[in-house]
Structure formats: structure tokens, C-alpha cells
Image (cartoon, rainbow, N blue to C red):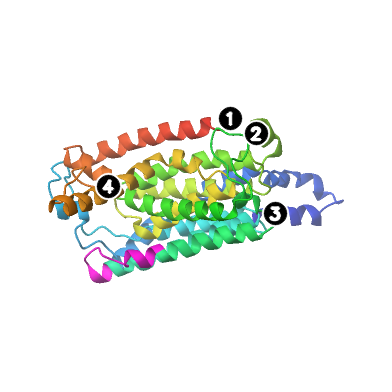
Amino acid sequence: MIYYLSQWLLDWFHGTAWEGRLSWLRLFHYITVRSAGAAVTALALSWWLGPKIIHWLKQLRFGQDYADKAEEAGGLAARVLSKKGTPTMGGVLIVTVLVFSTVLWTQLDNKLVLLTLLSVIVLAGLGFYDDYAKILQQTGGGTPPRVKLWAQTAVSAFVGIYLWLTPSTTKLVSEIMVPFYKHPIATHAAWIGILIVVLAIVGTSNAVNLTDGLDGLAIGCSLIVAFVFLVFTYVAGNAKAAAYLEIPLVPGAGELTVFCAALIGAGLGFLWFNCHPARVFMGDTGSLALGGAFGVVSVLIHQPFVLVIAGGIFVIEAASVILQTGWFRFTRLRTGTGRRIFLMAPLHHHFEKKGWYESQVVMRFYILCVLFAVVALATLKLR
């Protein structure tokens, strides 16, 4: 909205004595300026709204009054404080601030931004419903996994099919790009592309959800991944930078930089309240929305496989659950007794059970996430 307001004022006072005095409004035409504004706005709003939303969640008794899965399993000697009683659904804060800041600073006639915001809002709604079901049941069960998976798949399929049927974005789906290669490895492969879109959005949405098990872990890693896509979206939308680095140019992708900046601001603001000991959890409301956002953005800049590298921590966490579950079922069928690869899955609980303090696990995962981010950024040049 600020972009349109500045443009309206410049047009209104064009040719008058005020034209020179208002020339500074041209700054809002630059994506970098609006991205900075979105980040600062989101951070300030998070600090201001955070205590109010936490108090509101406590009043509504939207707290985790059931022990989480790690505490139910027991054996976490390094965990000093119980999570029980901490308000959940803090993702409401993230999504509210993210959407407002993006709308305030971006160009709303950009279909890539609108598609991203729509996906975030729908997935946040799905997560909110799941969190609310858990609170009602007080068992941590929530919405049946199949229902969540079908809803996520529907959203992802809509994004993929919409991009394919729109002439200006059809190549985002029909041409398959992979890191370290300048050219598509496959063309006219729309069905494969749609499948990749679904896997990127659904997979990342659930992977971030699985990572959200320790104070500050999911949101901190999300901030690092968001910075990677802040760079990628800016480059993908800039004709000169895209040509120099030989990556696909996506007209309008630069506006997604504003979205990523708003996400960073909202994430930093939420981390203020979510760091150990957490005053609020993001819940599925936040984790499903954040993961979905990364999936959608990666698809819209024609770099879905970069997400696998940048979000390496999320991939590892999801893989640990898949391996643990698969091996347990396989050995139970073969021997009658299920066996485990890890002490507990997701992987962060494995290290907790080995005696690592929660803050140690989180900080070391941050370090690994930074390393993955560096490798992802290196793909810009190594082609």
C-alpha cells in the first residue's frame, strides 16, 4: 500500500512546487527499501503484539496442558523445564504480522505474492484447526494425519496447476531446474513439475512441523532459510543479476523479496518470545504456514531443489522420522519386535536423550543450518 500511496502522491504533485520536496518518495519504488521497511515493520509489530497475543491465548486457555511426546517418552535427563502449560498457537502472531507487513510494503497486483499469501493463510488455518483439536482433546492427537495430508496436497496441487495453466508462469512447472546446472534438465514435463511442486510444499510444511519441538529451534532455522530465499528472490527478479549468475529470470519475483524480509522480521519478533524458556509455541498454526511458504517461494523462483539444501535441517529431521518409523515396522514384521535406529525421533529428541541440554541442541542445529545455507547460496555461482 505504501508503494501505491507514494506513486499517487508523486503523480498528484507532478509539475507543482511540491514535486521536488516529495522526490524522496521515489525511494519506495526500490525493492531493497521496501524490504527493509517490511522487516522493521514486522519486527516492531511482533514486539508490540507479542505480549498481547500471549495474554489472549492464556485467557482462552489455548495452552499445552498435555505433556509433549518427548516428555511422555521420558528419559530426557537434560530437560529441566516442562513444556506443559505453555500457550500454543503462537503462529497466529507470525502469520498476522507477516501478512500485514507484506501487504503494507509490496505491490499487491503481483500474482506471485498473492499466491504465496493465499497459501500461507490456508495452511495457517489448517494448522490452527489442528492446534485447536489438540487443545480440545488434551492428548496431543489433533487432526487425523490423513486429513492434514489431503488438505496440504490440495493446496499444493492448486498452486502447481495454476502456475502450469498461466502462460507467464507455465515454465516454472514444465521445465525442471536443479542446482549447479545452468539449463533445465527436462522440458515439457508438466506432470513431473506438478509432482515436484506438491512434494516441495507438502514436504517442507511437514518437515518444519516436525522440527518444531524445542524452544527456538524451528523459528531460528526458518530465519536462516528465509535469508537464503531473500537473496534468491532478489536475484531471480533482477534481469542483470539473473543474467550474470545464469539463473532463470522470473518477472515479478523481486516482490517476493519483500515477503521474505517480512518473514525475517516476523520470525525475529517471534523468537524474542520463543527462545528458551519459551513463553509461547508457534504450534501447527505457524509451522505448517512457514514450511508451506518456503515451498511456494522455492517453486515461484524456479529453484525447488535449492530448498532441499537450504532447509537441510528440516530434511534431516523429517528423514529421521521416516527412517525410524520404517525400520521399526520392518523389524517388527521380520522379528516380531520393533527396533529403533535413533533413541527417539525427530532427531533433536535423540540428542536430548543422549544428555545434551536443550539449548545445546538448538545452537548446534543453528550452526548446521548456517552451513547448509552457505552451500545453497554457493549454487548461485557454481553452475
The crowd level at tag 1 (other Cα within 10 Å; few <14, some 14-19, many 20+) is few
Which residue, given by chain and number where applicable, does mark 1 sit on?
A: 383
Quote the CA–CA distance across marks 4 and 2: 37 Å
- Amino acid bearing label 2: Glu
**Disc ID at residue 346:** 4
Please report contact status of discs 2 and 1: CB closer than 8 Å, yes or no.
yes
Residue range corresponding to the magenta coloring: 135-149
Earlier residue among tags 4 and 1: 4
Earlier residue among tags 3 and 1: 3
In the displayed orientation, state which residue is furthest to the front. 334
Quote the CA–CA distance across marks 2 and 1: 8 Å
Q: Secondary structure at mark 3?
A: loop
Residue 193 percent location from the top left of the image: 56, 52
Residue 269 percent location from the top left of the image: 42, 48
- Amino acid bearing label 1: Arg
Question: Can you say whether 309 is above or below 57 in the image?
Answer: above
Which residue, given by chain and number where applicable, does mark 3 sit on?
A: 168
> Which quarter of the rendering shows the N terminus?
bottom right
**In percent of the image, x 68 and y 53: which residue is there?**
3
Which residue, given by chain and number where applicable, does mark 2 sit on?
A: 246
